[in-house]
Image (tube, helix red, strand yellow):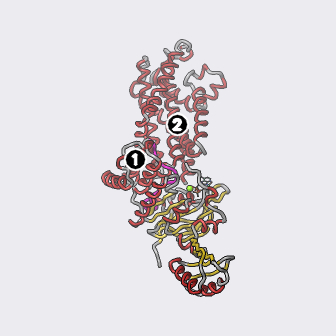
Amino acid sequence: MKDYWQEIRALTMRWVLRLSREKFSMLFTLVQPMLFWLIFFGNLFQRAADSQVTQAPNYISFLAAGVVVMTVLNNGLAGGVDLLFDKENGFLERLMSTPIHRSSVILSRFIFVMTITSLQVLVILGVAFLFGVHPATGLLGIATILLIGMMFGVGLTAISMAMAFSVKSHGDFFSVLGFLSLPMIFLSSALVPLAAMPGWMSVLAQFNPMTWAIDAVRPLILSGWSEALPHVGMVVLVMLVFDALCLYGGAKAFRRAMG
Amino acid sequence: MDRAIAIEVSRLCKTYDAHKAVDDLSFQVYAGEIFGLLGPNGAGKSTTLRTLITLLHPTSGTASVFGHDTVREADTVRMLIGYVPQERAIDRFLTGREHLQLLGALYHLTKEEAAKRIAELLKLVELESHADRPAKTYSGGMKRKLDIACGLLPNPKVLFLDEPTLGLDVQSRLRIWEYVRMLKARGMTIVMTTNYLDEADQLCDRLAIIDGGKIKTLGAPAELKIALGGDIVSLTLKETDRMAGLESALKNQPAIKAVRLTAKGLDIRVESPEKALPVILESANRLGCSIEFIQYNRPRLDDVFIAHTGRRIQDDIPKEE
Ligand SMILES: Nc1ncnc2c1ncn2[C@@H]1O[C@H](COP(=O)(O)OP(=O)(O)OP(=O)(O)O)[C@@H](O)[C@H]1O
Ligand SMILES: [Mg+2]
């Protein structure tokens, strides 16, 4: 157990070190979702978006939940990228030839991605606060948002890692990633409530786990516990199933790749 | 002589889809020797090595390291080995020291143990003054040195080197050969792959030539060459009339294996030129044969390779990075 912890800590610290060496790209990944989506998109659509439709005092406060979950989505889907590069340049092979628990590398990645994502979510909520979005459920609500984010993020990161272990080249990986991410966002309640979508889109959006996450995060920010609780209960169930499926697939891909 | 066996590979096969990358390989590596796998690109060298370091499961057959099966006792095997992959397995963003510290934790060393070993290794591979620079600022040779230091960090009983000098300049190659010999002198067993004939010839105690996933021949480089029939001394004589006399005079000499008449002289197969040459010259003198030209050919590993695979290894020289 002591060995296990030593491995995981060292491997996690490696991700942290790498991030700190890439200050420039770190800044952009951190800032991009708030700057682009929350500040530009949120303010841009302020008047175009009808508050009768969004059921929110203004568009930014409606959008905040979407941006939180989008950040989880993007971080999760990109969570396997570093492992992909490790696989391609042989570093993973070097790690796996040492007497570590087979799961350590993967766990370190989960820990790292979840931590970074949670920090980013906090920053987004902070920026939204500056624009007057005050979460209706307070600190406990924020903790619940982080929990939902992590539950969604675990499954996404598992998908991403499974892809990293299965693809033949990183070209394939990034094509699939690019193909997944935007449709996931548009086919969800991130930008527009389901009720305001064209029928076929809202049908598809209902099968998107992202919609469930957003529909729980949004009342936590906008309305209060009484409205949020049923959604939170529902999303926990949905995410348990989602994570179980993703982790099962991920474990299979990992075992196939690592013998 | 019975020697301790470090590695035992028995009827090893590894199939990718329908393609047999390794086909019924069996060999042993003795403790304390430098063992080479020599073969062209795609011969199955890296696949064999990956099986030995527990990263690949054999399709059939077994491999063991100091008696521990690479599949069933993978964890024990991983504690005994160090591995230097063929690709530069370097994280560009980490410094040399951080690479070694990471591995130190993965081998469960304490901070103090690790620090001591890291200092020694950095000194050994002469990277001390570059240890705290990110690896992306290293030259190819420096990366290779760091790779080797990483392989040595666990202080392994067996070190696996996959094409250790691929793409390096002559000086760096010689330096790496020196390290490898020094490690052997410290008692380490070394298994390496290469597709350089001179490297196999000069560095390996024994080697297996593999091609198409199969072992074509196995033995010490000198043995393999001798097995071709020994060195050849070719004499060209001024006058051809006394050739037959010289032939019969040499035929029964112990230092001489075979004599063959050619158009203008003799081809003499010898085991060691040191013993044979004086005998040849003395006989020629005694019989009054004056020699116009004498040529001595030692079979090279090239000849061994061609004899066993039917082609030259240079036919598909590696695409250097
Ligand atoms: N993961 C894989 N999937 C499919 N085929 C593979 C895989 N790895 C290796 N091969 C095939 O197995 C054969 C042996 O490959 P291997 O890497 O062992 O060769 P090698 O002797 O190390 O060659 P090189 O000198 O180029 O490194 C090759 O034909 C290669 O295409
Ligand atoms: Mg190879």
**B36 vs A100: above or below:** below
Furthest-top residue in this view: A47
In the rendered view, does A51 fall on the left or right side of B244?
A: left
Q: Which residues are magenta?
A: B77-92
Q: Nearer the viewer, residue B13 or B311?
A: B311
The amino acid type, in three-letter code, at marker 1 is Gly
Q: Does B82 lie within the magenta span?
A: yes
In the rendered view, does A159 fall on the left or right side of A128?
A: right
- Packing grade of label 2 (10 A; few <14, some 14-19, many >=20) is many
Residue beneath disc 1: B96
In the rendered view, does B259 fall on the left or right side of A99?
A: right
- Residue drawn at x 62%, y 81% is B258
Q: Tag 1's secondary structure?
A: helix
Label 1 – label 2 distance at C-alpha: 27 Å
The x and y percentages for residue B48 are 56, 61
From where the camera sits, is residue A142 visible?
yes
Quarter holding the C terminus of chain A?
bottom right
Q: Which mark is residue A234?
A: none
Q: Nearer the viewer, residue A50 or B240?
A: B240
**Which quadrant of the render holds ligand 2?**
bottom right
Q: Does A5 lie within the magenta span?
A: no
Q: Which subunit holds the residue at mark 1?
A: B
The x and y percentages for residue A258 are 54, 52
- Residue drawn at x 46%, y 45% is B91
- Residue drawn at x 53%, y 12% is A47
Q: Nearer the viewer, residue B264 or A67?
A: B264
Residue beneath disc 2: A78
